[in-house]
Amino acid sequence: MRSPELDGYGVLDALRANPVTETIPFMFLTASADRNNLQKIRELGFNEYILKPFHVDKFLAAIKAFLKSKIKYQSKDNF
């Protein structure tokens, strides 16, 4: 995500700094397959990422993994 004021990294950074939103799972969609970019995505705490263009099977697998992490997040709220 790129915008004039804040990119996807900045958005996640801000959300991770807020106790209310710090554990929400995030998925990153990117056209950059650069190793440094993918490493940065993981280091910042994105739960999943999808490279564009993507294949439907890889997209569905990422969505399933993302939903599993979302279920874990919701379970934490119940305890």
Image (cartoon, rainbow, N blue to C red):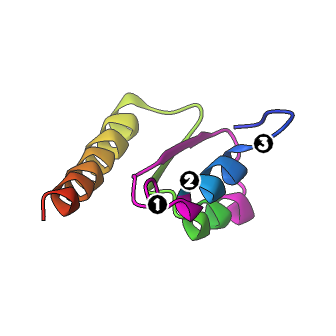
Per the image, the residue denoted by label 1 is: 22
List x then y, in percent, for residue 58: 38, 40
Q: Does residue 65 belong to the magenta stretch?
A: no
Tell me the amino acid under the disc marked 2: Leu
Of residue 49 and residue 11, the one placed in the foreground of this image is 11
Answer yes or no: do the residues labelled 2 and 3 have beta carbons within 8 Å?
no
**Residue found at the far right of this picture:** 4
User: What is the secondary structure assignment of the residue under circle 3?
Assistant: loop
Disc 1 residue type? Glu
> In the rendered image, which residue does mark 3 sit on?
6
| Residue at image location 56% in from the left, 53% down from the top | 15
Looking at this view, is 62 or 71 the one in front? Answer: 71
User: What residue is shown with label 2?
Assistant: 15
Disc on the earlier residue, 2 or 3: 3
Q: Give the residue at x 54% y 61%.
A: 16
Query: N-terminal of the two: label 1 or label 3?
Result: 3
- Between the C-alphas of marks 1 and 2, the distance is 6 Å
The reply to whether discs 1 and 2 touch (Cβ–Cβ < 8 Å) is yes
Q: Residues within 10 Å of mark 2 (few under 14, many from 20)?
A: some
| Local SS, label 1 | loop
Task: Tell me if 33 is positioned left or right of 47 in this view.
Answer: right
Residue 69 coordinates in the image, percent (x, y)? 28, 55
Give the structural element (helix, strand or loop) at label 2. Answer: helix
Taking 36 as reference, is 26 above or below it?
A: above
Q: In this orientation, does residue 66 appear? A: yes
The answer to which image quadrant residue 20 occupies is bottom left
Measured as percent of width and height from the top left, residue 19 is found at 46, 62
Residue shown at the point (21%, 52%) measured from the top left: 74
Under mark 3, the amino acid is Leu
Total numbered circles? 3
Which contiguous range is marked in magenta?
Answer: 16-37
